[in-house]
Amino acid sequence: MTRMVCGALACVILSAGPAFAQTAATAAPAEKFFLNVSAGGQVTTVEVKGTASATVYNQTALANTSREVSGGPLFDLTLGVPVHGKLALAGTVSLRKATSDGALSASVPHPLFSDAPRSVSTTVAAMTHQETWFGVLAAYTLSSTDRRSIMVMAGPMVVAVKHDAVTGIAVAEGASATSPTVTATIGSIGKSFWGYTIGTDVRVMLTKTVGIGGFIRYTAAPGNITGVESVTLGGLQAGAGLRVSLKK
């Protein structure tokens, strides 16, 4: 999907390029506001690690988990209002959700011997990860005509994360003392982290108010979701979609 979005955005940029190169291009009328509605994708994959434990035979059974949260589809909505000259302020919100399996590796105490842990590996299926990004951006128009424009945007972001993680384990003995079964308890972790975004948006108007366009940006927010280690959420993103501009 990301390759398709980047290809569509490249077509928009190429179509807009000749107009920006014309020194006698007609200046764009002043705007009241602009609205960008885009669908796209994220390239970056993040590995999130976690731990869980349980008391078994008066000893501690410990499980380490690892899960890759892949990139994938996202939806983005940006609304901006010009404030002075080529400078505008914009509010933005974007949503993305990913589902993936996690790997669990546990060390389980032996029922008969102390200091003789047994190793168990299993897979925890279909855990979800959801991100909702909010931001207030400064937007500056680099070049503009009555039909086309190129704008750069940057500013602080807050990401609200809902992340499925292994929060506990249960151990059951099998037919042999060497093969216990470990069952994971899944819980949802909700946290928020500060970050930033920087990117560019290209717009080609098809009528006075409606057009198409696309964006390429880098968004990042460091944070520790499970308490084990910090990761950087976000990454390289691209999208394309509807562009609305209301002129004065």
Image (cartoon, grey):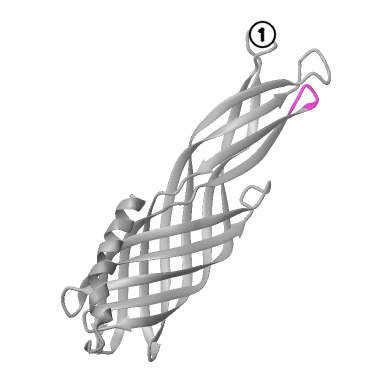
Tell which of 25 and 98 is nearer to you. Answer: 25
Q: Is 51 above or below relative to 152?
A: above
Q: Quadrant of residue 232?
A: bottom right
> Which three-letter amino acid code belongs to the residue tagged 1?
Ser
Q: Where, quadrant-wise, is the C terminus in this rendering? A: bottom left
Outermost residue, right side: 114
In this picture, residue 185 sits left or right of residue 53: left
Q: Secondary structure at mark 1?
A: loop
Outermost residue, left side: 207
Q: Residues within 10 Å of mark 1 (few under 14, many from 20)?
A: few
Which residue is denoted by mark 1 in the rendering?
176
Tell which of 77 and 141 is nearer to you. Answer: 141
Q: Position of residue 65 (x, y in %)?
A: 62, 36
The magenta span reads: 55-59
Outermost residue, top side: 175
Residue at 25%, 73% in the rendered image: 16
Q: Main secondary structure of the magenta part?
A: strand
Query: Residue 37 colored magenta?
Result: no
In this picture, residue 86 sits left or right of residue 18: right
Tell which of 6 and 164 is nearer to you. Answer: 6
Q: Is 173 above or below relative to 150?
A: above
Q: Position of residue 241 (x, y in %)?
A: 27, 63
In this picture, residue 51 sits left or right of residue 147: right
Residue at 80%, 25% in the rendered image: 58
Q: Position of residue 108 (x, y in %)?
A: 72, 23
